[in-house]
Amino acid sequence: MLNGICSLLEKTNNVKRSSYTWNALNAIISALQNPVILLVMTRTNGIYDAGIFSIAFAIATLMLYMGLYGLRRFQSSDLDEKYSFSEYHGMRILTCSLMIFVSLIYCIYGMCFTSYSMEKALVIFMICIVKCCQAYSDVYHGCMQQKGRLDVATKASSVRYTFELAAYVVLLVLTHNLLLSTFAFMAASIIGLLLTSVNAGRNYCTYRPSFNRAKIRGLAIEGFPLFASLFLNMYISNAPKYAIDSYLTDDIQAIYNMIFMPAFAVMLIANFIFNPILTTYAELWLAERREQIGKLKHEIKKQSLVIAGLTVLGLAIAATIGIPVLAFIFGTDLSELKIELCVVMIGGGALAYATYFSTVITIIRMQKTLIVCYGAVAIAAKLLSKFFVLNYGIMGAASMYAFLMIILAIMLFVITWYGIRKESIRLKMLSQ
Protein backbone atom coordinates (compact mmCIF):
# COMPACT_ATOMS: atom_id res chain seq x y z
CA MET A 1 0.00 0.00 0.00
CA LEU A 2 2.80 2.41 0.90
CA ASN A 3 4.55 1.79 -2.41
CA GLY A 4 1.27 2.33 -4.24
CA ILE A 5 0.79 5.72 -2.54
CA CYS A 6 4.34 6.72 -3.53
CA SER A 7 3.70 5.75 -7.14
CA LEU A 8 0.52 7.82 -7.28
CA LEU A 9 2.25 10.86 -5.77
CA GLU A 10 5.14 10.63 -8.25
CA LYS A 11 3.10 9.84 -11.36
CA THR A 12 3.19 12.69 -13.91
CA ASN A 13 3.76 13.32 -17.61
CA ASN A 14 5.16 16.81 -17.09
CA VAL A 15 6.86 17.67 -13.78
CA LYS A 16 6.82 21.45 -14.30
CA ARG A 17 3.16 21.61 -15.28
CA SER A 18 2.22 19.21 -12.50
CA SER A 19 4.12 21.35 -9.98
CA TYR A 20 2.17 24.48 -10.94
CA THR A 21 -1.17 22.66 -11.02
CA TRP A 22 -0.79 20.89 -7.71
CA ASN A 23 0.75 23.90 -6.03
CA ALA A 24 -2.35 25.88 -7.03
CA LEU A 25 -4.68 23.12 -5.85
CA ASN A 26 -2.75 22.77 -2.60
CA ALA A 27 -3.05 26.51 -1.92
CA ILE A 28 -6.79 26.40 -2.61
CA ILE A 29 -7.41 23.44 -0.30
CA SER A 30 -5.26 25.04 2.42
CA ALA A 31 -7.13 28.33 2.06
CA LEU A 32 -10.49 26.54 2.22
CA GLN A 33 -9.78 24.56 5.41
CA ASN A 34 -10.46 27.38 7.85
CA PRO A 35 -13.55 28.88 6.15
CA VAL A 36 -15.17 25.50 5.42
CA ILE A 37 -14.78 24.34 9.02
CA LEU A 38 -15.99 27.75 10.24
CA LEU A 39 -18.99 27.53 7.90
CA VAL A 40 -19.99 24.05 9.06
CA MET A 41 -19.34 24.86 12.71
CA THR A 42 -21.43 28.04 12.60
CA ARG A 43 -24.39 26.08 11.22
CA THR A 44 -23.98 22.97 13.41
CA ASN A 45 -22.61 24.23 16.73
CA GLY A 46 -23.31 27.96 16.64
CA ILE A 47 -21.22 31.11 16.59
CA TYR A 48 -19.69 30.59 20.07
CA ASP A 49 -17.89 27.36 19.11
CA ALA A 50 -16.94 28.99 15.79
CA GLY A 51 -15.21 31.72 17.80
CA ILE A 52 -13.26 29.15 19.82
CA PHE A 53 -12.13 27.40 16.65
CA SER A 54 -11.14 30.73 15.07
CA ILE A 55 -8.81 31.80 17.87
CA ALA A 56 -7.45 28.23 18.17
CA PHE A 57 -6.57 28.24 14.48
CA ALA A 58 -4.92 31.68 14.79
CA ILE A 59 -2.81 30.62 17.79
CA ALA A 60 -1.84 27.31 16.16
CA THR A 61 -0.80 29.12 12.99
CA LEU A 62 1.46 31.37 15.07
CA MET A 63 2.99 28.29 16.71
CA LEU A 64 3.45 26.75 13.24
CA TYR A 65 6.10 29.33 12.43
CA MET A 66 8.06 28.23 15.49
CA GLY A 67 8.08 24.70 14.09
CA LEU A 68 9.01 25.85 10.60
CA TYR A 69 11.72 28.18 11.94
CA GLY A 70 11.63 29.97 8.58
CA LEU A 71 13.94 27.40 6.98
CA ARG A 72 11.79 26.21 4.04
CA ARG A 73 12.73 29.12 1.79
CA PHE A 74 16.37 28.81 2.80
CA GLN A 75 16.33 25.03 2.27
CA SER A 76 14.62 25.08 -1.15
CA SER A 77 17.02 27.78 -2.40
CA ASP A 78 20.13 26.08 -0.90
CA LEU A 79 21.24 24.86 -4.32
CA ASP A 80 24.88 24.49 -3.20
CA GLU A 81 23.72 22.25 -0.31
CA LYS A 82 25.52 24.16 2.39
CA TYR A 83 23.56 21.95 4.79
CA SER A 84 22.51 18.34 4.18
CA PHE A 85 18.94 17.12 4.48
CA SER A 86 19.88 15.18 7.63
CA GLU A 87 20.89 18.46 9.25
CA TYR A 88 17.68 20.22 8.15
CA HIS A 89 15.78 17.18 9.45
CA GLY A 90 17.50 17.25 12.83
CA MET A 91 16.85 20.98 13.18
CA ARG A 92 13.16 20.48 12.29
CA ILE A 93 12.74 17.79 14.96
CA LEU A 94 14.11 20.22 17.55
CA THR A 95 11.92 23.12 16.42
CA CYS A 96 8.78 20.95 16.31
CA SER A 97 9.52 19.67 19.82
CA LEU A 98 9.87 23.27 20.99
CA MET A 99 6.60 24.13 19.24
CA ILE A 100 4.69 21.41 21.10
CA PHE A 101 6.23 22.43 24.44
CA VAL A 102 5.38 26.12 24.00
CA SER A 103 1.84 25.25 22.84
CA LEU A 104 1.32 23.18 25.98
CA ILE A 105 2.62 25.97 28.23
CA TYR A 106 0.35 28.47 26.45
CA CYS A 107 -2.73 26.30 27.03
CA ILE A 108 -1.88 25.75 30.71
CA TYR A 109 -1.36 29.49 31.12
CA GLY A 110 -4.71 30.14 29.44
CA MET A 111 -6.54 27.90 31.90
CA CYS A 112 -4.71 29.21 34.98
CA PHE A 113 -4.52 32.94 34.33
CA THR A 114 -7.21 33.77 31.74
CA SER A 115 -10.79 32.68 31.15
CA TYR A 116 -9.94 29.60 29.03
CA SER A 117 -12.07 26.55 29.78
CA MET A 118 -10.59 23.06 29.67
CA GLU A 119 -12.41 22.46 26.38
CA LYS A 120 -11.02 25.62 24.77
CA ALA A 121 -7.46 24.81 25.90
CA LEU A 122 -7.69 21.25 24.56
CA VAL A 123 -9.05 22.44 21.22
CA ILE A 124 -6.17 24.92 20.91
CA PHE A 125 -3.57 22.27 21.79
CA MET A 126 -4.93 19.67 19.36
CA ILE A 127 -4.98 22.15 16.50
CA CYS A 128 -1.39 23.06 17.43
CA ILE A 129 -0.55 19.35 16.94
CA VAL A 130 -2.15 19.53 13.49
CA LYS A 131 0.06 22.49 12.62
CA CYS A 132 3.08 20.63 14.03
CA CYS A 133 2.41 17.85 11.50
CA GLN A 134 2.43 20.53 8.80
CA ALA A 135 5.73 21.92 10.09
CA TYR A 136 7.36 18.48 10.17
CA SER A 137 6.15 17.50 6.69
CA ASP A 138 7.58 20.76 5.35
CA VAL A 139 11.19 19.59 5.79
CA TYR A 140 10.50 16.68 3.40
CA HIS A 141 8.74 19.00 0.99
CA GLY A 142 11.73 21.35 0.99
CA CYS A 143 13.97 18.46 -0.02
CA MET A 144 11.56 17.43 -2.78
CA GLN A 145 11.40 21.00 -4.12
CA GLN A 146 15.19 21.29 -3.99
CA LYS A 147 15.38 18.16 -6.16
CA GLY A 148 12.85 19.45 -8.67
CA ARG A 149 9.77 17.53 -7.42
CA LEU A 150 7.56 20.24 -5.95
CA ASP A 151 4.66 18.33 -7.52
CA VAL A 152 5.16 15.38 -5.14
CA ALA A 153 5.31 17.70 -2.13
CA THR A 154 2.15 19.59 -3.06
CA LYS A 155 0.25 16.38 -3.88
CA ALA A 156 1.15 15.04 -0.43
CA SER A 157 -0.03 18.24 1.26
CA SER A 158 -3.24 18.32 -0.77
CA VAL A 159 -4.13 14.76 0.20
CA ARG A 160 -3.41 15.42 3.88
CA TYR A 161 -5.38 18.70 3.96
CA THR A 162 -8.37 16.99 2.31
CA PHE A 163 -8.22 14.07 4.75
CA GLU A 164 -8.08 16.46 7.72
CA LEU A 165 -10.93 18.59 6.44
CA ALA A 166 -13.16 15.60 5.72
CA ALA A 167 -12.56 14.14 9.19
CA TYR A 168 -13.42 17.41 10.94
CA VAL A 169 -16.53 18.17 8.88
CA VAL A 170 -17.96 14.64 9.05
CA LEU A 171 -17.55 14.45 12.84
CA LEU A 172 -19.04 17.93 13.29
CA VAL A 173 -22.11 17.04 11.25
CA LEU A 174 -22.58 13.68 12.97
CA THR A 175 -21.84 14.61 16.59
CA HIS A 176 -21.93 18.44 16.92
CA ASN A 177 -19.13 17.84 19.44
CA LEU A 178 -16.30 20.37 19.17
CA LEU A 179 -13.79 18.33 21.20
CA LEU A 180 -14.39 15.01 19.44
CA SER A 181 -14.30 16.62 16.00
CA THR A 182 -11.01 18.37 16.78
CA PHE A 183 -9.54 15.05 17.97
CA ALA A 184 -10.52 13.49 14.62
CA PHE A 185 -8.87 16.46 12.89
CA MET A 186 -5.63 15.79 14.79
CA ALA A 187 -5.71 12.02 14.20
CA ALA A 188 -6.31 12.50 10.47
CA SER A 189 -3.36 14.89 10.28
CA ILE A 190 -0.96 12.44 11.93
CA ILE A 191 -2.09 9.52 9.75
CA GLY A 192 -2.00 11.66 6.60
CA LEU A 193 1.54 12.84 7.42
CA LEU A 194 2.85 9.28 7.76
CA LEU A 195 1.11 7.96 4.63
CA THR A 196 2.07 10.83 2.31
CA SER A 197 5.00 13.12 3.11
CA VAL A 198 7.05 10.74 5.27
CA ASN A 199 6.24 7.76 3.05
CA ALA A 200 7.18 9.55 -0.20
CA GLY A 201 10.19 11.21 1.41
CA ARG A 202 12.18 7.98 1.42
CA ASN A 203 12.74 8.33 -2.33
CA TYR A 204 14.39 11.76 -1.96
CA CYS A 205 16.10 11.90 1.41
CA THR A 206 17.30 9.88 4.34
CA TYR A 207 15.10 9.46 7.41
CA ARG A 208 18.02 9.57 9.83
CA PRO A 209 18.44 13.09 11.28
CA SER A 210 21.76 14.67 12.20
CA PHE A 211 22.20 16.67 15.39
CA ASN A 212 25.74 17.85 14.74
CA ARG A 213 26.13 20.78 17.13
CA ALA A 214 28.09 22.99 14.79
CA LYS A 215 25.61 22.49 11.95
CA ILE A 216 22.55 22.92 14.19
CA ARG A 217 24.11 26.10 15.58
CA GLY A 218 24.75 27.28 12.03
CA LEU A 219 21.15 26.59 10.99
CA ALA A 220 19.87 28.29 14.13
CA ILE A 221 21.87 31.40 13.31
CA GLU A 222 21.05 31.34 9.59
CA GLY A 223 17.37 30.69 10.19
CA PHE A 224 16.75 33.00 13.14
CA PRO A 225 16.12 36.16 11.07
CA LEU A 226 13.69 34.17 8.90
CA PHE A 227 11.98 32.59 11.91
CA ALA A 228 11.72 35.89 13.75
CA SER A 229 10.35 37.73 10.72
CA LEU A 230 7.79 35.05 9.82
CA PHE A 231 6.74 34.55 13.44
CA LEU A 232 6.34 38.30 13.90
CA ASN A 233 4.57 38.51 10.53
CA MET A 234 1.96 36.03 11.72
CA TYR A 235 1.68 37.83 15.06
CA ILE A 236 1.12 41.12 13.25
CA SER A 237 -1.46 39.56 10.91
CA ASN A 238 -3.38 38.04 13.81
CA ALA A 239 -2.85 40.84 16.35
CA PRO A 240 -6.50 41.99 15.97
CA LYS A 241 -7.66 38.41 16.70
CA TYR A 242 -5.53 38.19 19.84
CA ALA A 243 -6.88 41.57 20.99
CA ILE A 244 -10.47 40.41 20.38
CA ASP A 245 -9.71 37.22 22.35
CA SER A 246 -8.42 39.32 25.27
CA TYR A 247 -10.96 42.14 25.35
CA LEU A 248 -14.11 41.08 23.48
CA THR A 249 -16.09 37.84 23.03
CA ASP A 250 -15.83 34.58 21.07
CA ASP A 251 -18.93 35.62 19.08
CA ILE A 252 -17.18 38.77 17.82
CA GLN A 253 -14.07 36.67 17.13
CA ALA A 254 -16.10 34.46 14.80
CA ILE A 255 -17.59 37.43 12.94
CA TYR A 256 -14.20 39.10 12.45
CA ASN A 257 -12.80 35.84 11.06
CA MET A 258 -15.68 35.62 8.59
CA ILE A 259 -14.77 38.95 6.98
CA PHE A 260 -11.04 38.18 7.29
CA MET A 261 -11.24 35.04 5.12
CA PRO A 262 -11.30 36.75 1.68
CA ALA A 263 -8.29 38.94 2.56
CA PHE A 264 -6.22 35.96 3.64
CA ALA A 265 -7.20 34.21 0.40
CA VAL A 266 -5.52 36.99 -1.63
CA MET A 267 -2.21 36.27 0.11
CA LEU A 268 -2.53 32.50 -0.32
CA ILE A 269 -3.34 32.80 -4.03
CA ALA A 270 -0.36 35.13 -4.51
CA ASN A 271 1.79 32.58 -2.66
CA PHE A 272 0.88 29.69 -4.93
CA ILE A 273 1.79 31.79 -7.97
CA PHE A 274 5.32 32.58 -6.82
CA ASN A 275 6.19 29.50 -4.72
CA PRO A 276 7.07 27.35 -7.79
CA ILE A 277 9.56 29.96 -9.05
CA LEU A 278 11.63 30.31 -5.86
CA THR A 279 14.34 28.07 -7.27
CA THR A 280 14.38 30.12 -10.50
CA TYR A 281 14.84 33.33 -8.48
CA ALA A 282 17.73 31.73 -6.60
CA GLU A 283 19.38 30.62 -9.85
CA LEU A 284 19.10 34.12 -11.33
CA TRP A 285 20.63 35.66 -8.21
CA LEU A 286 23.45 33.13 -7.86
CA ALA A 287 24.45 33.55 -11.52
CA GLU A 288 26.08 36.90 -10.61
CA ARG A 289 25.62 38.32 -14.09
CA ARG A 290 24.06 41.69 -14.86
CA GLU A 291 21.66 40.28 -17.43
CA GLN A 292 20.42 37.70 -14.90
CA ILE A 293 19.83 40.41 -12.29
CA GLY A 294 17.87 42.26 -14.97
CA LYS A 295 15.70 39.19 -15.47
CA LEU A 296 15.16 38.95 -11.71
CA LYS A 297 14.03 42.58 -11.60
CA HIS A 298 11.63 41.88 -14.47
CA GLU A 299 10.19 38.87 -12.61
CA ILE A 300 9.69 40.97 -9.46
CA LYS A 301 7.85 43.67 -11.42
CA LYS A 302 5.67 41.07 -13.09
CA GLN A 303 4.77 39.40 -9.80
CA SER A 304 4.06 42.79 -8.20
CA LEU A 305 1.53 43.53 -10.95
CA VAL A 306 -0.11 40.13 -10.40
CA ILE A 307 -0.54 40.86 -6.68
CA ALA A 308 -1.94 44.31 -7.49
CA GLY A 309 -4.43 42.74 -9.91
CA LEU A 310 -5.54 40.17 -7.35
CA THR A 311 -5.98 42.88 -4.72
CA VAL A 312 -8.07 45.10 -7.01
CA LEU A 313 -10.20 42.12 -8.05
CA GLY A 314 -10.70 41.11 -4.42
CA LEU A 315 -11.62 44.66 -3.44
CA ALA A 316 -14.14 44.93 -6.28
CA ILE A 317 -15.80 41.68 -5.22
CA ALA A 318 -15.82 42.78 -1.57
CA ALA A 319 -17.46 46.11 -2.44
CA THR A 320 -20.20 44.54 -4.55
CA ILE A 321 -21.22 41.00 -3.64
CA GLY A 322 -18.80 40.27 -0.79
CA ILE A 323 -21.11 40.77 2.19
CA PRO A 324 -24.19 39.01 0.72
CA VAL A 325 -22.04 36.02 -0.28
CA LEU A 326 -20.33 35.77 3.12
CA ALA A 327 -23.66 36.18 4.94
CA PHE A 328 -25.17 33.38 2.86
CA ILE A 329 -22.15 31.10 3.33
CA PHE A 330 -21.91 31.50 7.10
CA GLY A 331 -25.61 32.01 7.80
CA THR A 332 -24.87 35.16 9.80
CA ASP A 333 -26.04 38.76 9.42
CA LEU A 334 -23.00 40.76 8.21
CA SER A 335 -24.90 43.58 6.48
CA GLU A 336 -23.29 46.35 8.56
CA LEU A 337 -19.71 45.26 7.80
CA LYS A 338 -19.20 46.20 4.13
CA ILE A 339 -16.63 48.95 4.86
CA GLU A 340 -14.79 46.72 7.31
CA LEU A 341 -14.54 43.98 4.68
CA CYS A 342 -13.08 46.39 2.11
CA VAL A 343 -10.54 47.70 4.63
CA VAL A 344 -9.46 44.14 5.47
CA MET A 345 -9.11 43.34 1.74
CA ILE A 346 -6.67 46.23 1.33
CA GLY A 347 -4.71 44.81 4.25
CA GLY A 348 -4.74 41.37 2.59
CA GLY A 349 -3.18 42.78 -0.56
CA ALA A 350 -0.50 44.53 1.49
CA LEU A 351 0.18 41.26 3.34
CA ALA A 352 0.68 39.51 -0.01
CA TYR A 353 3.26 42.14 -0.97
CA ALA A 354 4.99 41.86 2.42
CA THR A 355 5.20 38.07 2.15
CA TYR A 356 6.51 38.26 -1.40
CA PHE A 357 9.18 40.89 -0.69
CA SER A 358 10.33 39.01 2.42
CA THR A 359 10.81 35.94 0.19
CA VAL A 360 12.94 37.91 -2.29
CA ILE A 361 14.93 39.41 0.59
CA THR A 362 15.64 35.85 1.80
CA ILE A 363 16.84 34.76 -1.65
CA ILE A 364 19.22 37.73 -1.93
CA ARG A 365 20.43 36.84 1.58
CA MET A 366 19.49 40.10 3.34
CA GLN A 367 17.23 38.29 5.80
CA LYS A 368 18.80 39.96 8.84
CA THR A 369 17.05 43.19 7.88
CA LEU A 370 13.70 41.45 8.26
CA ILE A 371 13.99 41.39 12.03
CA VAL A 372 14.13 45.19 12.19
CA CYS A 373 11.07 45.62 9.94
CA TYR A 374 8.90 42.98 11.55
CA GLY A 375 10.07 43.86 15.04
CA ALA A 376 9.13 47.51 14.64
CA VAL A 377 5.69 46.72 13.22
CA ALA A 378 5.06 44.03 15.89
CA ILE A 379 5.78 46.57 18.63
CA ALA A 380 3.33 48.95 16.96
CA ALA A 381 0.74 46.15 16.84
CA LYS A 382 1.18 45.44 20.55
CA LEU A 383 0.86 49.11 21.48
CA LEU A 384 -2.12 49.85 19.22
CA SER A 385 -4.27 46.71 19.43
CA LYS A 386 -5.99 47.36 22.76
CA PHE A 387 -6.88 50.96 21.86
CA PHE A 388 -8.24 50.13 18.39
CA VAL A 389 -10.22 47.04 19.40
CA LEU A 390 -11.68 48.36 22.66
CA ASN A 391 -12.73 51.71 21.17
CA TYR A 392 -13.78 50.76 17.65
CA GLY A 393 -14.55 47.02 17.76
CA ILE A 394 -14.41 45.19 14.43
CA MET A 395 -13.74 48.40 12.46
CA GLY A 396 -10.79 49.10 14.77
CA ALA A 397 -9.43 45.58 14.24
CA ALA A 398 -9.79 45.88 10.44
CA SER A 399 -8.21 49.35 10.30
CA MET A 400 -5.27 48.34 12.48
CA TYR A 401 -4.66 45.27 10.33
CA ALA A 402 -4.63 47.26 7.07
CA PHE A 403 -2.44 50.03 8.51
CA LEU A 404 0.17 47.60 9.85
CA MET A 405 0.31 45.57 6.61
CA ILE A 406 0.76 48.66 4.43
CA ILE A 407 3.62 49.99 6.58
CA LEU A 408 5.30 46.56 6.55
CA ALA A 409 4.97 46.16 2.77
CA ILE A 410 6.52 49.59 2.14
CA MET A 411 9.49 48.84 4.41
CA LEU A 412 10.18 45.48 2.75
CA PHE A 413 9.86 46.94 -0.75
CA VAL A 414 12.51 49.55 0.07
CA ILE A 415 14.93 46.85 1.30
CA THR A 416 14.29 44.67 -1.78
CA TRP A 417 14.91 47.63 -4.11
CA TYR A 418 18.08 48.60 -2.23
CA GLY A 419 19.52 45.05 -2.21
CA ILE A 420 19.01 44.43 -5.93
CA ARG A 421 20.23 47.90 -6.91
CA LYS A 422 23.36 47.44 -4.79
CA GLU A 423 24.12 44.12 -6.51
CA SER A 424 23.54 45.63 -9.96
CA ILE A 425 26.03 48.39 -9.23
CA ARG A 426 28.57 45.88 -7.91
CA LEU A 427 28.31 43.69 -11.02
CA LYS A 428 28.53 46.74 -13.28
CA MET A 429 31.77 47.80 -11.63
CA LEU A 430 33.22 44.28 -11.94
CA SER A 431 32.42 44.19 -15.67
CA GLN A 432 34.22 47.45 -16.38
Image (spheres, helix red, strand yellow):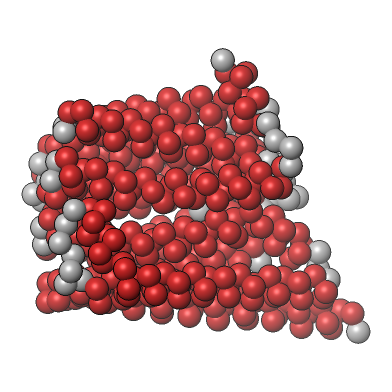
With respect to residue 326, does 109 lie above or below?
Answer: above
Answer with the quarter of the image where residue 133 lies. top left
Answer with the quarter of the image where residue 132 lies. top left
Q: Residue at x 83, y 82 (%)?
A: 428
With respect to residue 374, does 8 lie above or below?
Answer: above
Front residue of this view, candidates 234 and 18: 18
Number of numbered markers:
0
Q: Is residue 114 visible?
A: yes
Q: Residue at x 56, y 42 (%)?
A: 154
Q: Is residue 350 left or right of residue 321?
A: right
Residue 105 x, y percent position in the rendering: 24, 42
Name the quadrant of the N terminus.
top right
Q: Is residue 415 left or right of residue 262?
A: right
Residue 170 x, y percent position in the rendering: 28, 30
Name the quadrant of the C terminus.
bottom right
| Residue at far right of view | 432
Front residue of this view, candidates 410 and 353: 353
Q: Residue at x 58, y 74 (%)?
A: 304
Answer with the quarter of the image where residue 278 lies. bottom right
Residue 311 x, y percent position in the rendering: 45, 72
With respect to residue 22, does 260 lie above or below?
Answer: below
Front residue of this view, candidates 398 and 341: 341
Residue 204 x, y percent position in the rendering: 68, 32
Q: Residue at x 61, y 70 (%)?
A: 303
Q: Is residue 90 visible?
A: no
